[in-house]
């Protein structure tokens, strides 16, 4: 089984375990071009670094280039370098990043933003293993492994004529896709623990962690910013709550509004029983065990009221998920009056989208 972490890449989910194994295989073949695809914030550069670090090229340079961050008129000279007198201000020659990466790996991030004229020059590097500096007349041989990355759909760009088809197939020798965080929610707890410890090393009062209710809520979010967004949240919480445990009510509002989970089989809104069956009630506890100490209690004791409040919040959240946000059905599951449940939802500032007009639930 692959490890839970590889050069800063964290995950024990099946998708990440497959990724770790693929990184190992790509590192063994240190010549083929790799195309990494994934959303922003998924860690494409970390994967590229891991491939380089595991390969026989690790003793040479790993040279990253963000094609989207460097202006088009500068990117060519940054990549290929230039000769003396190549343009006004070129008082001497400059080595480009391709030459600097000789023997090692060149990481071209956001390659979908590279303009066509540079795509043609890069294609020559891949095909002929040589390049010409800006203003140069003599090709320079180079031995470099190109690892490219993008969040764009290059195949679609090829169809639209905005990316060279021949370069796409040269880059896509070994495709590698990084799953977004929302597709590996089982890794969120592991990632939180890692970031809490990593960020805490530089703080006088590090964060103690996130309680179970907070972690379970975070695991239901879409995470459009992926792992980078989660890291930023942990850093935010460390600044505000250093020395303590982050609870559900401590999370910023946008992270407390988790969408309801998929419906159970059948429509729960059709149930009209006055009593709740035991199997139905047990669903509330299937993923929500009480966040209380079991064998070892802290020397200073526990915060009884906070634990009770968190567990109550957890039960309400779980009931709302099971009923797709239907508060009447959630109250039935919890054996509470509907008005009592609404009062608790508002008091705890839970899920603004579930506290709006209730007319649709009447009748």
Image: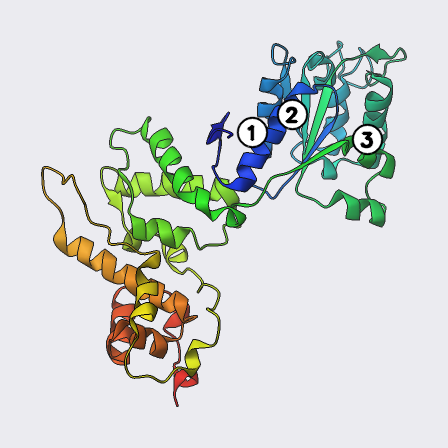
> Which quarter of the picture shows residue 254?
bottom left
Location of the C terminus (image quadrant):
bottom left
- Lower sequence index among marks 2 and 3: 2
The residue labelled by disc 3 is: 170
Above or below 240: residue 322 = below
The reply to whether the C-beta atoms of the residues labelled 2 and 1 are less than 8 Å apart is no
79 left or right, relative to 198: right
User: Does residue 349 appear in this view?
Assistant: no
Query: Which residue is depicted at the point 44% across and 65% down?
Result: 260
The residue labelled by disc 2 is: 25
Inter-mark Cα distance, 2 to 1: 16 Å
Residue 204: horizontal and vertical position, in percent?
25, 28
The reply to whether the C-beta atoms of the residues labelled 2 and 3 are less than 8 Å apart is no
Above or below 17: residue 58 = above
The residue labelled by disc 1 is: 46
Viewer-nearest residue: 154 or 321: 321
Residue 226 - label: none
Residue 126: horizontal and vertical position, in percent?
82, 23
């Amino acid at each position: 089984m692959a490890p839970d972490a590889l050069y800063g890449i964290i995950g024990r989910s099946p998708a990440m375990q497959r990724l770790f194994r693929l990184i190992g295989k790509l590192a063994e073949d240190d010549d083929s071009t790799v195309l990494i695809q994934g959303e922003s914030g998924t860690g494409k550069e970390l994967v590229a670094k891991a491939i380089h670090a595991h390969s026989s090229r690790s003793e040479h340079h790993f040279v990253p280039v963000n094609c989207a961050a460097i202006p088009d008129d500068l990117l060519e000279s940054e990549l290929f370098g230039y000769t003396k007198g190549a343009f006004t201000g070129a008082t001497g020659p400059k080595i480009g990043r391709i030459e600097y990466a000789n023997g090692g790996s060149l990481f071209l991030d956001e390659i979908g933003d590279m303009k066509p004229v540079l795509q043609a020059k890069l294609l020559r590097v891949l095909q002929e293993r040589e390049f010409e500096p800006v203003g140069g007349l003599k090709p320079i041989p180079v031995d470099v492994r190109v690892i490219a990355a993008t969040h764009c759909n290059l195949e679609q760009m090829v169809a639209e004529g905005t990316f060279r088809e021949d370069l796409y197939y040269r880059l896509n020798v070994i495709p590698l896709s990084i799953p977004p965080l929302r597709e590996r929610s089982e890794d969120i707890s592991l990632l939180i623990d890692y970031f809490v410890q990593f960020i805490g090393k530089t703080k006088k009062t590090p964060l103690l962690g996130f309680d179970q209710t907070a972690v379970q809520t975070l695991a239901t979010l879409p995470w459009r910013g992926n792992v980078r967004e989660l890291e930023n949240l942990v850093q935010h919480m460390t600044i505000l709550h250093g020395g303590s445990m982050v609870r559900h009510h401590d999370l910023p509002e946008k992270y407390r509004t988790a969408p309801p989970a998929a419906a159970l089989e059948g429509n729960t809104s059709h149930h009209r029983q006055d009593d709740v069956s035991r199997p139905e009630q047990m669903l509330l506890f299937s993923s929500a065990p009480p966040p209380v100490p079991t064998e070892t209690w802290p020397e200073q004791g526990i915060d009884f009221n906070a634990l009770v409040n968190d567990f109550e919040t957890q039960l309400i959240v779980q009931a709302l998920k099971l009923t797709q946000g239907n508060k009447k059905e959630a109250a039935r599951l919890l054996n509470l009056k509907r008005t009592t449940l609404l009062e608790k939802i508002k008091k705890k500032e839970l899920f603004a989208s579930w506290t709006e007009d209730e007319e649709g639930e009447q009748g």
